[in-house]
Image: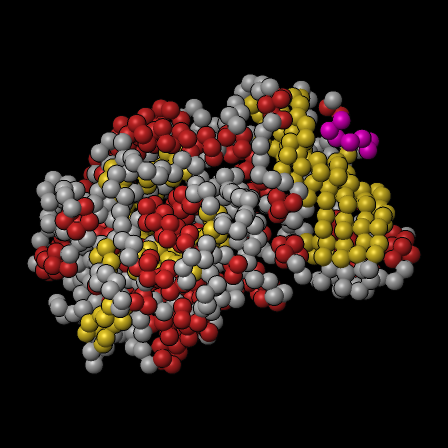
Amino acid sequence: MVTLRIRYTKTQYMKYLGHLELMKLFERVFRRHQYPLKFSEGFNPHPKMTFASPLSVGYATKGDLMEVILTEEMPIEKVLATTFPEGIEILDAKYIESKTSLMAGIDSSEYLINVELQTPISDLEGQFEHFLSQDAINYEKKNKRGQMRIIDAKAQIYKAKIIYEENGEFTLRCTLKTSSQGNLNPETFVKAFLKFCRQPEESALILVERLAMFDAAHKPLFDLIA
Amino acid sequence: MNLEGLLQRVEKPSRYIGGELNTFNKPLDDNTIRFCFAFPDVYEVGMSHLGMQIIYQLLNGVEDVFCERAFAPWHDMEAMMRENELKLFSLETKTQLGDMDVIGFTLQYELSYTNILNMLNLSGISLLSKDRHERDPLIVAGGPCAYNPEPLAEIVDMFFIGEGEELLIDFIDVYRHYKQRNIDKETLLRRCADIEGVYVPKFYEPQYNEDGTIQSVKTLDGVPEVIKKRIVRNLEDGFKLETMIVPFADIVHDRAMLEVFRGCTRGCRFCQAGMLYRPIREREQDSLVENIDKILSSTGFEEVSLTSLSTMDYSGIGTLVKKLVDKYEAKSVGVSLPSLRLDSFSIDVLKEIQKIKKTGLTFAPEAGTQRLRDVINKGVTEDDIESTFKSIFELGWSRVKLYFMIGLPTETMEDLDGIADIANLGTYLFKQYKPEYMKKSVQVTVSTSCFVPKPFTPFQWMAQSTAENFYEKIDHLKVKLNNKKVVYNYHDPKTSVLEGVFARGDRKLAAVLIKAYELGCKFDGWQECFNHDNWMKAFEACGVSTAFYTTRERQKDEIFPWDIISPGVTKQYLWLENTRAQDEIVTGDCRTDCKGCGVNNIIIGGDC
């Protein structure tokens, strides 16, 4: 048995696939390309696949990671030649030895967030700086029992910068915590900022794209297995 | 807001994006015939439909035709589309339906008709055929409900009756002249009316008696008086479905499908499909195995379903299933059958299938007593039921689903008690026959649907029960099915009554349909969306009585709205079967000897 780690993109319309839909698609594409899949035991066998930090529906990615267990190695050039519906592409693939789980290594993700507003925010840069320099950047989140609780995002924001602004549209580049010990959703982050600016968050169009994932030492995750 | 904005906000956006494996995106030029296959329900329902898969691959196989798909948007999407003035679009190229040449609706269920109106309206297309112009898309429809096209006759421009594989190609050949502007729309319609299996309602004018029944149908311009259904004579010749679109969303039937035969020889008297899809035509076993291999290797599906009516009747079903299981067990590709017969042979096949994946078990005795099963000609005996229970429990199943109908002709309370008796027999036999290791307790699920008399069945003359009557029967069953190991589900009678109206409806219903739609009715087949009060208001506003269509028993010689269509089975044969039903006489399987239904003479011109 071998573990194949894959770095893939999910862009264009494919970003609208939910996580379960994405898993089903990968399974079917793998079957279609005759990957030697390893199946689980039991009455409903399914292939063994893990996706690192699955994205919300509507988010694109320039390089997410997944792993699949195969009964034997399949040549990497064949893996790279695997065809998906337009919008999904395998960028890179490697067989890995490491026994540590894919999820455990992840600490943060870098995103591009594009925001379209009905009315522009005046002095956007100033406001953003102001927003980030608060003592606490609080937002509300439902816990597992469905109760709302206040969370401080301050420690979950590693980097954040406005890189483009024009006519009520702006783009943020930011690195946010993405781990099992805490996770800041980019949309939540933007909405907290809009609330701070007293902007209606409902009418804002927020498009998120993940650029990369990092470990606790801020090294890109895929490079680690090189 | 644009489409991107809508997709960011809507529930399950993958319903609207297209681009699945094995979809098409063809280059367009002036001669490309743009056909939109429209399914009047949500993506998850529409994508489960084998007919859509067939037509999609068939039409896209024609060089100058580009077939795309559209489904009914769910409420949230529709509201946002209307708010943002976005028209209904195709999944493949996001083209507005108003820019298509032809929009083809499939009529699988009477309660999807308001969704057709809604999809037209969302496309900015006039609802009535007479209000549409030369360059509006042509609205066509097919599918089982097209066998009584009359409720939609003023809305749809033409209907395709029967199997589409050859018929659609004939239609395209005529349409091509119109596309190239060699003929006008009137000429197109008239020429299509001469294609066997095409019904163009504008050339047919029903005349009514004072009591609202049909006196005669006037045909105009020399069109055929009766439209005979089309079939594919030999399923091995011509088009075969060798790949399928692989859907994204978690659709209802998310698997490869392979038709092993068409038609059915059982002759159950309530079953419309059994009459409509005659004669029986089986595919060859080797060809099926090869076909499945092609579908699986081009789709990656992890399950294949062998489909047809009464699939266990396929001549080589045992060896076919064995071959498939042997071939796909290692790849963990499951094999499934849509329904099982209540007999020992089915159990043997089941043993094979469960080697790969253990499936739920569903059987359909349909009626609770032998007497009533004889009336409806469902060839299942008490012994069959008992021995099936014994076998499945011995094999380690502890859950079983049983389907019945209520409101069948001649039904009494005793027949309903019979349903409870069968369920109780199941729980009792479980205790006797379960394996020693079995710790689980038994669960028998009884589901009842409300009988709807359908056109072209021996029961087409019969009265349907009233909603009140159905409720009484359901209440009776609720009391009788008091066994803790038995779960009872039932279908809502109100929707079945409405289904009954449209199933045997006529042209007068178009006004009611439009009125109901204007009052907000849509997705009527969805329990949570069905608005009975609005429907009743619509009937009242149009001065149309539901009882005329449902609870009225018809005279032997009444002319039915659907008599302009012929599925090959004659009215005389259906009447004969009707009288045999009243006399509780069973009619055997017509594989062994011909019962003279007429399909051989009328459709084939020779033996079945």
* Closer to us: B281 or B218: B218
Q: Is residue B93 magenta?
A: no
> Where does residue B243 sit, x and y in percent of width and height?
43, 36
> Where does residue A26 sit, x and y in percent of width and height?
56, 35
The structure residue drawn at horizontal position 90% and vertical position 60%, both measured from the top left corner, is: A123
Q: Is residue B302 above or below residue B494?
A: above
Could you tell me if residue B524 is visible in this image? no
Please identify the quarter of the rendering in which residue A158 is found: top right
Does residue B252 appear left or right of residue A117 in this picture? left
Does residue B510 appear left or right of residue B18 in this picture? left
The structure residue drawn at horizontal position 46% and vertical position 54%, both measured from the top left corner, is: B180
* Closer to us: B563 or A121: B563
> Where does residue B560 sit, x and y in percent of width and height?
21, 67
Q: How is the image coloured?
A: secondary structure
* Closer to us: B498 or B240: B240
The structure residue drawn at horizontal position 40% and vertical position 46%, both measured from the top left corner, is: B55
Quarter of the image with the N terminus of chain B is bottom right
Q: Is residue A20 above or below residue B509?
A: above
* Closer to us: A198 or A148: A198
Does residue B81 appear left or right of residue B103 in this picture? right
The structure residue drawn at horizontal position 74% and vertical position 22%, both measured from the top left corner, is: A226
> Where does residue B413 sit, x and y in percent of width and height?
19, 63
Quarter of the image with the C terminus of chain B is top left
Q: Is residue A222 magenta?
A: yes
Q: Is residue B90 above or below residue A122?
A: above
**What span is colored magenta in the figure?**
A217-223
Give the residue at the far front of this rendering. Answer: B182
Main SS category, magenta section? loop
Please identify the quarter of the rendering in which residue B435 is found: top left
